[in-house]
Amino acid sequence: MRTDDGRINVLKQKKSTMENKQAIDALNALVEINNDRIEGYETATKETNEPDLKVLFTKLADTSRDCRIELEREVEQLGGTPAKGTKVTGKLFPAWMDVKSAITGKDRKAILESCEFGEDHALKAYDDVLEDDREHLNVEQTSLIESQYDLLKADHDAVRALRDSLVESH
């Protein structure tokens, strides 16, 4: 009997470890996206001389810092190591914003369009995790990700509304 119980426990532990790895990978993908946003908005803050945009971009970066902290905590609770870098594609966002800003003379509309492009990318990453990895996440993790998605969606909509207000006024 002991042998069978021991085997069952080992099998359960292996399954749990595998599920944890998949959840850790999904959560770390979102850590990287938030790192992308932080890097992108720090770049945007440097690229604009407009005080209201500096305030907005600082707020958006702060949203991602808060999200990252929550995600890192979940990764650690699962026994994983939080991701430290950005997504490979994320490195393109700040670089692209630098080029776009230089070309357009730091045009407000162009900077906001670049930011919206980055926001679209972040929302898609959250969508992908919720669609593709939900089965590996517990209820609390899913709720956390959905809550963060709502925060990022509100940020996205704020950037888009500001950009659209410029289109309408010209």
Image (cartoon, rainbow, N blue to C red):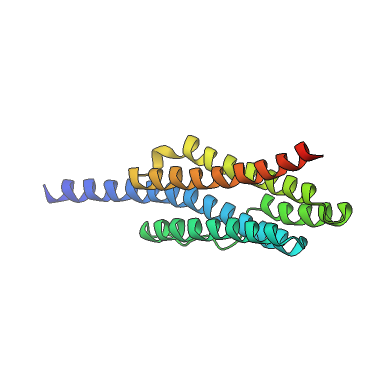
Between residue 104 and residue 170, name the one nearer to us. 170
Q: In which quadrant of the rendered view does residue 113 lie?
A: top right
* Residue name at image x 55 percent, y 60 percent: 62
Percent x, y of residue 34: 57, 55
Which quarter of the rendered picture does the C terminus lie within?
A: top right
Residue 86 seen: no
Percent x, y of residue 27: 47, 51
Q: Is residue 70 left or right of residue 6?
A: right
Q: Is residue 50 left or right of residue 1?
A: right
Percent x, y of residue 118: 67, 47
Between residue 168 and residue 132, name the one nearer to us. 168
* Residue name at image x 39 percent, y 44 percent: 143
Percent x, y of residue 69: 46, 61
Q: Is residue 84 above or below residue 162?
A: below
| Residue at the left extreme of this rendering | 1
Between residue 127 and residue 54, name the one nearer to us. 54
Between residue 153 and residue 86, name the one nearer to us. 153
* Residue name at image x 88 percent, y 53 percent: 103
* Residue name at image x 72 percent, y 52 percent: 93
Q: Is residue 19 left or right of residue 169?
A: left
